[in-house]
Image (tube, rainbow, N blue to C red):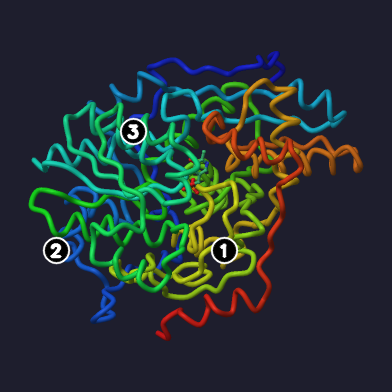
């Protein structure tokens, strides 16, 4: 096909996916099941339903249904900010002088500023349908909490957010956006939960971590009638909802007969990347096509590149089920890096399994080089990227520069997961030359590994 490719490939509303793609259904080697930390047996529907919404538990445990219908109410909400554009980075290509073709899927076009709304609205919908009063959750950088607040206010649900303390202090505006949408926001660790009090006793000066905020949110949900806990990443259900990113991307590329060579995404818990690659990985698993996939993580929290593949706790307080995943250990608290959304110690079991089987690559990058890429991108493509998203930009640019050296005309697609307006303190540090790169030593990591249970 030789159609001129526009700067932005927009889809029609009618081209919105009507079903999510369940990547696990295409995997011969399924991700390992969640285990009950007491009995070490796979978690049952009944056990999980004490913490999570019923329909979401069904989705969590379903590794055989390839496509799952998106309820009409959720599609209606998606229509407010989707389909998201797939953008041809013509300006970036020109500036880099690369023969590569670069595309990015932009998920920052909604008030929450990231892809997280795709799953937040689904989770709020199922909670409402179950007749619950509200949901609890944790938030790191604040994007998930914001997305969930929006989704909860849309369906009239109460929303309690435990926000990692350093973000709570660094990002007062995020907090206020959440409160604008009616959420109740508590800095974590807090004295409002038993697990929070225990963590504070042990580490009084901690700046908090996602793993710790998760423990608090789970406790708050299970203590209160009519509440369930919801999670913005890591779980299979979240990857399922995020498959809208990949499905739209595939539809847009197919319209112009474009086949990507490399697909790149940043990886915190793995949900945006899992969603972006879903239809492409499904093809690869079926032997229909081949693609390279690259997960990009911060060198300060190198889960895939330096972690262990083992059953581990999902949270610091060890209240959640055990998940088999790449992990740095649930007690690992990364340095206060500026990509809050990528500071999780583990990785979704689906991507962990695919990575372990060599179906996906991973790369760790340092934050000053990430911010260099972020600024370069902002000046050329106009969008001010989130620090998390900029990890993908860094590697997409690196790959495009390689193409310049080799003369290869590869097609690179990356996920631009969100905007960085609430991250200007980080940009300020970068501009003032005060940003540092902290890479944990093997010794630092071995402390985290020591806490991984022997199963
Ligand atoms: C949360 C977040 C991420 C990382 O989360 P994943 O579950 O790995 O996708 C990446 N980018 C942005 C903008 C985020 O808010």
Pointers 3 and 1 in contact (C-beta within 8 Å): no
Q: Nearer the viewer, residue 76 or 186?
A: 186
Q: Identify which residue is drawn at 28% across, 21% down.
A: 76
Which mark is first along the chain, 3 or 2? 2
Label disc, if present, on residue 46 of the rendered structure = 2
As displayed, is residue 206 above or below residue 164?
A: below
Q: Residue furthest bottom?
A: 454
**SS at badge 3:** helix
Side of 298 where 178 appears, left or right: left
Q: Which residue is mark 3?
A: 178
Q: Residue at x 57, y 52 (%)?
A: 287
Alpha-carbon span between mark 3 and mark 1: 29 Å
Position of 168 with respect to 73 (left or right) is right
Dividing the picture into quadrants, the one containing residue 151 is: top left
Within 10 Å of disc 2 (Cα), the crowding (few <14, some 14-19, many 20+) is few
Q: Nearer the viewer, mark 2 or mark 1?
A: 1
Mark whose residue sits in front, 3 or 1 = 3
Mark 1 crowdedness (10 Å alpha carbons): few <14, some 14-19, many ≥20: many
Where's residue 452, x and y in %?
A: 45, 79
Residue 426 in the image: x percent, y percent?
62, 40
What residue appears at the point 55 percent right and 25 percent down from the top-left corner? 252
Residue that numbered label 1 is attached to: 303
Q: Residues within 10 Å of mark 3 (few under 14, many from 20)?
A: many
Judge by depth and name the residue closer to the eye, 100 or 329: 329
Ranked by sequence position, the earlier of labels 2 and 1 is: 2
């Amino acid at each position: 096909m030789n159609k001129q490719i526009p700067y932005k490939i927009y889809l029609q509303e009618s081209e919105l996916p009507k079903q999510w793609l369940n990547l696990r259904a295409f995997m011969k080697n399924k991700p390992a099941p969640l285990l009950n930390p007491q009995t070490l047996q796979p978690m049952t529907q009944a056990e999980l339903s004490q913490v999570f919404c019923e329909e979401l538990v069904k989705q969590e445990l379903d590794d055989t249904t390839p496509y799952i219908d998106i309820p009409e109410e959720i599609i209606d909400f998606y229509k407010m900010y989707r389909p998201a554009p797939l953008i041809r980075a013509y300006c970036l290509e020109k500036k880099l002088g690369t023969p590569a073709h670069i595309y990015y899927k932009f998920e920052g076009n909604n008030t929450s500023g990231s892809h997280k709304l795709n799953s937040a609205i689904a989770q709020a919908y199922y909670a409402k349908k179950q007749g619950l009063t509200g949901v609890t959750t944790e938030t790191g950088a604040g994007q998930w909490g914001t997305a969930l607040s929006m989704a909860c206010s849309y369906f009239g649900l109460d929303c309690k957010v435990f926000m990692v303390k350093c973000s709570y202090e660094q990002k007062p505006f995020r907090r206020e956006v959440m409160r604008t949408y009616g959420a109740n926001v508590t800095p974590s660790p807090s004295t409002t939960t038993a697990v929070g009090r225990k963590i504070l006793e042990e580490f009084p000066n901690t700046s908090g971590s996602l793993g710790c905020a998760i423990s608090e949110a789970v406790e708050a949900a299970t203590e209160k009638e009519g509440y369930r806990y919801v999670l913005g990443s890591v779980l299979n259900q979240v990857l399922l909802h995020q498959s809208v990113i990949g499905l739209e991307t595939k539809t847009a590329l197919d319209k112009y007969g474009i086949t990507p060579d490399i697909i790149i995404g940043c990886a915190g818990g793995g949900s945006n990347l899992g969603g972006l690659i879903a239809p492409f990985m499904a093809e690869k698993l079926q032997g229909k096509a081949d693609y390279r996939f690259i997960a990009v993580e911060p060198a300060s929290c190198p889960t895939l590149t330096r972690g262990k593949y083992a059953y581990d706790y999902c949270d610091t307080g060890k209240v959640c089920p055990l998940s088999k995943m790449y992990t740095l250990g649930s007690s690992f608290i990364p340095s206060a890096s500026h990509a809050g959304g990528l500071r999780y110690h583990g990785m979704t079991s689906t991507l962990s399994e695919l990575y372990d089987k060599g179906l996906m690559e991973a790369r760790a990058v340092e934050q000053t080089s990430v911010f260099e890429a972020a600024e370069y991108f902002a000046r050329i493509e106009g969008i001010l990227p989130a620090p998390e998203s900029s990890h993908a930009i860094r590697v997409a640019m690196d790959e495009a520069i390689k193409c310049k050296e080799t003369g290869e005309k590869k097609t690179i697609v990356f996920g631009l997961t969100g905007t960085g307006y609430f991250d200007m303190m980080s940009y300020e540090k970068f501009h003032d030359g005060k940003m540092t790169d902290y890479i944990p030593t093997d010794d630092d990591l071995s402390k985290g590994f020591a806490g991984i249970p022997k199963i």
